[in-house]
Amino acid sequence: MALRSFAGGTHPPEIKEATRGRPIRDLAPPDQLVVPMAQHIGRPATCAVKPGDTVARGQVIGEPAGFVSAAVHAPVSGKVKRVVQCNTPLGPACEAVLLENDGADIWAEGCNEPADPDGLSAQEVRERVQAAGIVGLGGATFPTHVKLTPPEGKAIDTVILNGCECEPYLTGDHRLMLESPHTVVQGLKLVLRAVGCTRGIVAVEANKPDAFQAMRKACAQRAEDGLDLAAQLLAVKYPQGAEKQLILALTGRETPSGGLPLDVGVVVQNVGTAHAVYEACAHARPLTERVVTVAGPGVGAPANLRARIGTPVRALLEACDWEESATRELVLGGPMMGVAHFDPDLPVNKGLSGILAFTDPTVFDHRHCIRCGRCVDGCPQRLVPSELSILVEAGRFEDARDADLLDCIECGVCTYVCPSRRPIVQWMKLAKDELARRRAREEAANRSGD
Amino acid sequence: MFDLTAFVIALLVTAGIGTALGLVLAWGGRRFHVETDPRIQQVEDALPGINCGACGYAGCAAYAEAIVSEGAPMSLCAPGGADTAHAVARVMGAEVEAAEPKLSVTCCQGGHVDMRFDYHGVQDCRAAHVAGQAGGRKACTYGCLGFGTCARACPFGAITMSPERIPVVDWDKCTGCGRCVEVCPRGLNRVDPESYYVFVLCQSHDKGAVVNKLCDRGCIACRRCEKACPFDAIHVIDNLAVIDYTKCTACGKCVEACPKNTIVSFRKQRRARKKAREQAAQAREGAA
């Protein structure tokens, strides 16, 4: 039987061999950490400490600024040295707390204590997740407690745990599913309880048969009456792990334009997020660390590292035999959607899934669109990227919006397959940013006109 | 054999059809005649016809119609300037005080700022601004990105890029339409009346010490201009000197005081322009 998937997509080389066979290593926290206040979608957290304060691991150092925001916790015990401005991997510069690690790694009061996750009500699960500052660890960093609070009138019938990890190089989720399948399934059960539904699916791409078996076994062992837990194998195709494509493949439901998964009764969580939910509910551990894949030709010993939030990217690279002088480009995230960054002293944040060092990046000059249609065949959102790229290149942003530009998920398939090497995704991002700017300007004009 | 009858018949039939249709058109033209103000066309002819939109209307035709039927102000055409305003006024049979011309200024001189990384993406400031998550390739996150988006956007070819990749505005071509202001993702271009003489050519809100390291022409918020100003017209707000043009007399004290040559006076050039324009107006009156 053909495995389920979606229409479109592409097949980049996987390049996962280097790290998928190696267990996740714990990286010792460095002497100094920089913990950004903006690590999630929504308003940045408000800094809750001042220079000179002593903090314990798990203590709140950033209070959430509203509902769509997330708390930030101290990843180590130590002393607040300064409040600084820091660059972030995905987003503008923001406020950050410079922490000096005292090496004792003492947990704050109330943290790291065993709790009974089975006794929690839906509301309690949501509260714990919110207090633990958990966000989507797949990279989108949307605050998880918001996803676990479906608005009135939106019934959720399925929770999908996303273990596709369709980006090349990355194997963090793969290792997590292999090493801690039970915590992931326990996390899934907590998510199910929070959104009030019974059907949970763990989605795994077919290139991770060992992880699929582990998850299937764990689902069977953790089965409960009235719960329908299953692992599902999916075809290997990029971007299988994109939320809307995953929902389409598993349920046949198409998320409406401009809509959210909960409009079709589905909540999607990354497997790493489920793990973090379990940690928060069963051990009262806030989100202070995450698994990061360090790979690429520029590192001698690629690995998956469990690093504290706020550890400089440099420390992770150096733990993997980084050849700094040979590295010409650093990519944060996966190679398809990640962004190149120049500063190896950036801190690891909650959304950082991979650090890739490239020694010989190819720089392309783009040419005109030859209307070959490969991007049209590949676009998982069924847009016409060729047309959109031409409109944006000509500065016709409003026309691009009318051609459904805003449905673009920036997966990068169009740019990857384009024989003219056109930077289509970059144009999409530019156009979205420009449209947002124009809208803001219009709103400002309307306000002053009133 | 040549058949003359067939030729004549064909000629008559064609001529008959032509006459009949012509009569229908002539009748239709009268029957469905729409009364328009002939001045709309005349005003439109007086406008430059480049449809830049600087007047706030959809194009020259829309503006012409607005002038005639809605009584819109006659001096809104920035590209046309005084000459156009006078031509429009002649059509409308009114006198008009031409608006003071506006000119574009780019508030960055940071051509020598270090680059933090190589940028290989789309060669457009807006793309570079989005892509450089942390604020573009230049070490100064406020300064000009140098890809010339404003130069390409200018409908009048008034902006060229200097060898240091900073826009240079040719005021003889600049019409103050404001397109360059719209497209700059850093908000570095500004369009002001010609009578503004002194400008702070920096937009960096970084602390003085940071700017001092990054740029040889950036505002370091030293407040010397503030102290030098006899009219209380310049103040350092959020690490950047800002001029209050209602108080500024263009005396030039701040320009002298600025240790980084960030504050620049265009008094000489702009006065010369004004004088030339006044002479042209006089010549026009003399000719009329």
Image (tube, coloured by chain):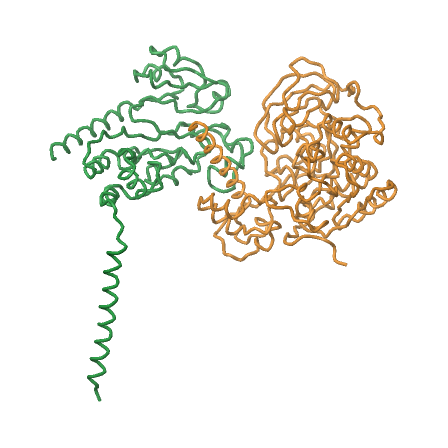
Which residue is drawn at the image coordinates 71% and 51% (left, top)? A236
Query: Residue A386: percent from the left, percent from the top?
Result: 52, 52
**Chain A: drawing colour:** orange
Q: Quadrant of the N terminus of chain B?
A: bottom left
Query: Residue A311: percent from the left, percent from the top?
Result: 69, 27
Identify the residue at the far bottom of this view.
B1
Query: Residue B28: percent from the left, percent from the top?
Result: 26, 59
Which residue is drawn at the image coordinates 33% and 14% (left, top)? B253
Of all chains in the rendering, the one displayed in green is B
Q: Quadrant of the C terminus of chain B?
A: top left
Instruction: Name the side, left or right, on which A52 lies relative to B16.
Output: right
Instruction: Name the side, left or right, on which A310 lies relative to B119.
Output: right
The vertical placement of A46 against A136, above or below, is above
* Total number of numbered discs in the rendering: 0
The vertical placement of A272 against A450, above or below, is below
Q: Quadrant of residue B88?
A: top left
